[in-house]
Image (cartoon, rainbow, N blue to C red):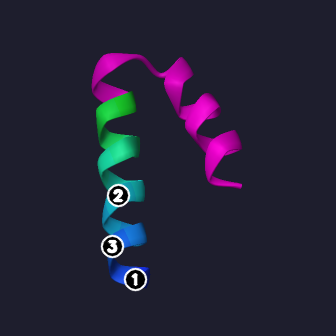
Amino acid sequence: MMLISYAVTWLNMIYALITAPTDVELWGEEIE
C-alpha cells in the first residue's frame, strides 16, 4: 500500500507541474 501511495503522490506532483504549478498546493492539502 505504501508503494502505491508513493507512486500516486509522484504522479500527482508531476501532473500538477505539467498542468499548473498552483495545483501542487491543492494536492498538498488533500494529501495531508
Q: Callout 3: few (<14), some (14-19), or many (20+) C-alpha neighbours within 10 Å?
A: few
- The residue carrying mark 3 is 4
Can you name the residue that lies furthest to the front here?
1
Residue 31 shown in magenta? yes
Q: Callout 1: few (<14), some (14-19), or many (20+) C-alpha neighbours within 10 Å?
A: few
Dot 3 and dot 2 residues touching (CB under 8 Å) = yes
Picture layout, residue 25 above or below residue 2:
above
Residue 18 shown in magenta? yes
At x 70%, y 41%, the residue is 29
Q: CA distance from mark 1 to mark 2?
A: 11 Å
Would residue 27 appear left or right of 16 to someone viewing this image? right
Q: Secondary structure at mark 1?
A: loop
Q: Secondary structure at mark 2?
A: helix
Range drawn in magenta: 17-32
> Residue 1 at what x, y percent from top left?
40, 82
- The residue carrying mark 2 is 8
Dot 3 and dot 1 residues touching (CB under 8 Å) = yes
> Residue 13 at what x, y percent from top left?
40, 43
- Give me the disc on residue 11: none
- The residue carrying mark 1 is 1
Residue type, label 2: Val
At x 51%, y 24%, the residue is 23
Q: Which one is in front, 24 or 31?
A: 31
Q: Secondary structure at mark 3?
A: helix
Q: Which one is in front, 26 or 18?
A: 26
Q: Which one is in front, 30 or 17?
A: 30
> Residue 14 at what x, y percent from top left?
31, 41
Would residue 24 appear left or right of 18 to someone viewing this image? right
Q: Callout 2: few (<14), some (14-19), or many (20+) C-alpha neighbours within 10 Å?
A: few
